[in-house]
Image (tube, grey):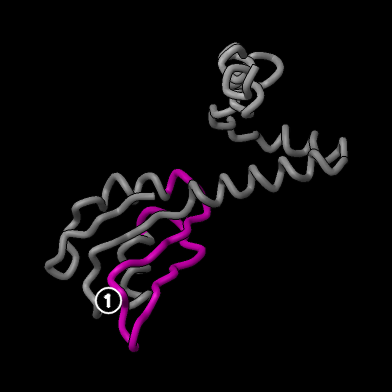
Amino acid sequence: MSARDRSRSRSPGAARKRRGWETDDGADASAPAKPQTPEEIAAQLAGGGLGDLTSLMQNGQLMKSRCRIYVGSLDYSLTESDIRQVFQAFGTIINVEMPKEGGRSKGFCFIEYTVPEAAEMAIQAMQGFQLKNRTIKVGR
């Protein structure tokens, strides 16, 4: 029997499990993780262990990515302080990352808020907003 015939004889469920799409309990591994409450995080810290630390780090990265937004189609003359003035209405801004080329903006930036709700409000309110006669694009 060739390798190709052997691969065809396996069940689709076994192939998904082998590729990591499905966990042992039958749950779908591609489903997004539920954000943890402070109580759950404290319980994990109290329990200790490297596995707990890894999941906490992954949860922190997930939260950070939910707090960060992209703003594009910006006028090249805008500065980080201009962006802060406009977007601080939605919440406390941790960081504004505005790449520059030759001393001027490249026309886009990334804004990081302290909480994901502020980022979501900024996306909803500012998508398609006119800033210095340009329609800006806001998203993740």
**For mark 1, does the 10 Å Cα neighbourhood hold few (<14), some (14 to 19), or many (20 or more) residues?**
some
Q: Residue 36's x, y, as percent?
A: 64, 34
Between 21 and 68, the residue placed more toward the observer is 21
Residue 77 position in % (x across, y down):
24, 80
Tell me which corner region of the image, top left, top right, bottom left or bottom right, holds residue 14. top right
Mark yes or no: residue 89 visible. Answer: yes
User: Which residue: 58% across, 30% down?
Assistant: 34
Q: Does 96 appear in magenta?
A: yes
Q: Indicate the position of residue 6 as horizontal and vertical percent values.
A: 63, 17
Q: Is residue 47 left or right of residue 118?
A: right
**Callout 1 amino acid:** Leu
Q: Is 123 included in the stretch rendered in magenta? A: no
Q: Is residue 69 left or right of residue 4?
A: left
Q: Is residue 28 visible?
A: no
Q: SS at mark 1? A: loop
- Between 122 and 13, the one nearer to me in the picture: 13
Write down the region rendered in magenta. 89-118
Which residue is identified by label 1?
78
Q: Residue at x 35, y 82 (%)?
A: 101
